[in-house]
Amino acid sequence: MSADTTGTADEASLFGPDSRFRAFFDDPRWALAIIRATVLEAAHPQVGAALAENSTFVTHPWRRLRNTFLSMRRMFDADPVVREREAARLNRLHARMSGSDSRGRPYDAMDRATRAWVVATLFESAVTMCRLSGQPLDRDTMERMYAEYRGYLAALDGDATELPEDLNDFWPYFDWVVENELEDTEAARVILYRLFDHLPAPPLLDGAPTLWAAGRAVVGPLLGAITVASLPESYRRRAGLAETPGAPTLMQGAYLTAGLTRFLPADWINADSIIELLSLSPDSDDPRARTAAALRSRVKRASALFRLLTPLSGDLAPDPAPSADTGEGRRPAREFFRRVLDQTGDGWLDWPDLAAMARELSTRLDLDEPEETRLYDAFAAWWRELQAALDTNGDGRIDADEYAAGVPSLAGPALIRVAEVLFDATDKDGNGTIDADEYRALFRTAFHRDLTTTDGTAGTYGRSAFVGDFLSFMSGRRASAPYDPLLTDA
């Protein structure tokens, strides 16, 4: 089989709603396959180093899931313009990620062989998913799907030469990388043994931490055991990943059960609807928020009942009591450092944290060049300003003590510049004010319900008001109902 991904006609046939890749988006088995593929990606030393230093997948996994899902949708859109624009965005994002791992080895997110490995894990995990769920792919379907994945790589790199052209040659390539390049990386361990056990609640269930923690305590270890059991045996052995007794049977049952969901109504397993519902904030004006609010109310009642019937452990904190304030109170410096500044969750503030902020805001606003670069440059200047003012021991990063002992309300010229650039990026029509649609693009909620500006104006959001509110929030002066979800949502 020869997968030619260069011709326009052949390329067009690989994408769009009829592709095998797109068909998996609404398949619940895909969730298990994605977790498996992510571990295999993270086990590659280059990917593992990039994730450990730059990614927010531990502290903001639901945000990462939503953005990744949206990107994959775009990459397999039937319109080549949409695919090319998303590929350009991903390449700009990856071009900003390079450095050295803990052993001094360089990594580069634009390394072609490493990017090919990421695509390879997606394809191999999809094939494994079908096999474990009792629905193995026939040869023709597998070849078609492999051509699609090579087309995906070609859209990113310009060609797919880093992956074998013939499917028969793919399996020796995959086995060779597993045997010779994968390692027991910190990122892989975090996914398997920390992410599931400490997974924060999505916004939909954020109001019921007790019930979420109880469910997570049961499901987290199971997901870890299922994922470990599904990994190639040679990697498990080298990485020292102990297989839980009965895990193979549990894994088989999980995949088979997920496969049975194909008999459910399509609306119940629509990935777009599920992800959007999980992402709804409590005060969103989205019509689905009414249903979500009713569900949250029931979840809180169930959580309260659970606390009455079950003694609380140290990990199951009681649900917060309703607050009468407006959510605009002053935030302690250490809380602001943990929830807002430390985007990667490693306990430090450094450039990857501010880069993650720029990346999230650029994604929300769907920025192209040169606006995206202007925003990154503004955040880079703010990092230099913070470093000069707060890095008292000169180690190139800022810890919570240095931040708390410094000036939590720091709002110098560089942060003002960030606010101005963000305003310009949000004000798409350039008329000097942010209208309702522009406001929603940034905050994902309604203009009229949540807008409270420092200058007291109603119905408009001008530059000075926006800059003032943004500085008040980003300098840690006060919590803000509309601004908090920008950078704190899980």
Image: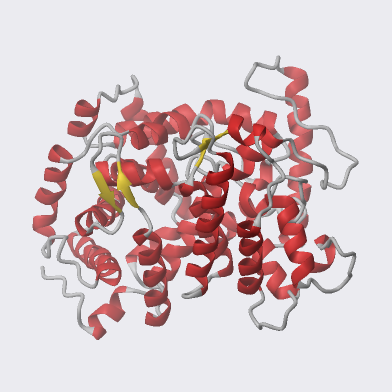
Quadrant for the C terminus in the image: top right
Q: Residue at x 75, y 30 (%)?
A: 319
**Res. 251 in view:** no
Q: Residue at x 31, y 55 (%)?
A: 109
* Residue 323 drawn above or below residue 215: below
| Residue 91 position within the rendered picture, expressed as x and y whole percent measured from the top left | 35, 65
Tell whether 5 sits left or right of 314: left
Figure coloring = secondary structure
Residue sitting nearer the eye, 166 or 400: 400
Tell whether 435 sits left or right of 69: right
**Res. 392 in view:** yes
Residue sitting nearer the eye, 325 or 223: 325
Q: Hey, which quadrant is residue 316 in on the image? A: top right
Q: Residue at x 80, y 41 (%)?
A: 330
| Residue 126 position within the rendered picture, expressed as x and y whole percent measured from the top left | 31, 52
* Residue 232 drawn above or below residue 138: above
Quadrant for the N terminus in the image: bottom left
| Residue 471 position within the rendered picture, expressed as x and y whole percent measured from the top left | 72, 55
Residue sitting nearer the eye, 180 or 462: 462
| Residue 313 position within the rendered picture, expressed as x and y whole percent measured from the top left | 65, 16
> How many numbered discs, if any?
0
* Residue 318 drawn above or below residue 147: above
Tell whether 35 sits left or right of 405: left
Residue sitting nearer the eye, 46 or 64: 46
